[in-house]
Amino acid sequence: MSDPQIEKLLILQDRDIALQKIEQELDRIPQERSALEALITAEEANIEAASHALKQKEVERHELETEVQAKESAINRFRNQQLEVKKNDEYRALTHQIEQSEQEIADLEEREIGLMLEIDETREAFEAEKAKIEARIVEQKKQIALLGEREQNLKASIDAARAAVEAAREPVDPSFLGHYDRVKQLCKRPPYVAAIEAHKCCGCHLRVSNEVSSGALGAGEPTFCDQCARMVYA
């Protein structure tokens, strides 16, 4: 490489790439932050859902207790009525209602015992899983804080990177600079100025014509890859 303009463009290209990396990192940070915040929201929703399911079981147990108390009150009422009735068939009917209510109470209490065991198991599993989820949330919040620090650091460095690009543009010949900017718009991704090695452009990795290979050896005029339109040198 003997063209001083190409040397200047390579310096500019390095600084452009450095600036682009900072800009790309800054662009990614809001997305990364949003993804972490979505994870936290999902984790918190999981805790809330599990807590709600546990509360529902507690409500069900309370309802069983209330139903047992209602049936016990009914039994007491039936027994008081037995003291007042005079006919045997009325007495037997009340006895049947008492026995039926006692059986229903036994069934309810059996269900309640099973539900209490289930609640204990569910609560134990919930507390264990909740601890894991909360630990993950703490870690995710730490990552969000680190993203904030990184964002501030990048914002602090981007002005210097932009100034470095402007400083590198000043000494470049306007013609070469114009071609460089045009290639940058066309190619979208670096390199914009690429070496030719073994008759291949290092930008697109395709073989160039002999005319392009020869032109890249000269100085004073820019040469372009006939495959990808990048500015090339040898």
Image (cartoon, rainbow, N blue to C red):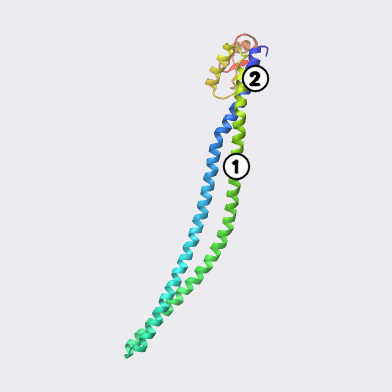
Which corner quadrant of the image does residue 81 belong to?
bottom left
Marks 2 and 1 in Cβ contact (< 8 Å): no
What residue is disc 1 on?
A: 145
Image quadrant occupied by the C terminus: top right
What residue is disc 2 on?
A: 11
Q: Measured from the top left, where is residue 233 in percent x and y?
A: 63, 15
Foreground mark, 2 or 1, reads 1
The residue most toward the right is: 2
Q: In the image, what residue occupies the spot 61% across and 22% down? A: 163
Q: In the image, what residue occupies the spot 60% across and 26% down? A: 159
Q: Secondary structure at mark 2?
A: helix
Q: In the image, what residue occupies the spot 51% across and 58% down? A: 51
Q: How many marks?
A: 2
Q: CA distance from mark 2 to mark 1?
A: 35 Å
176 displayed left or right of 95: right
Q: Measured from the top left, where is residue 102 in percent x and y?
A: 43, 80
Q: Residues within 10 Å of mark 2 (few under 14, many from 20)?
A: some
91 displayed left or right of 58: left
165, above or below 145, in the image: above
41, above or below 211, in the image: below
Which corner quadrant of the image does residue 171 belong to?
top right
Please say whether residue 106 is visible from this viewpoint: yes
Q: Amino acid at mark 2?
A: Ile
Q: Amino acid at mark 1?
A: Ala
Q: In the image, what residue occupies the spot 59% across and 58% down? A: 128
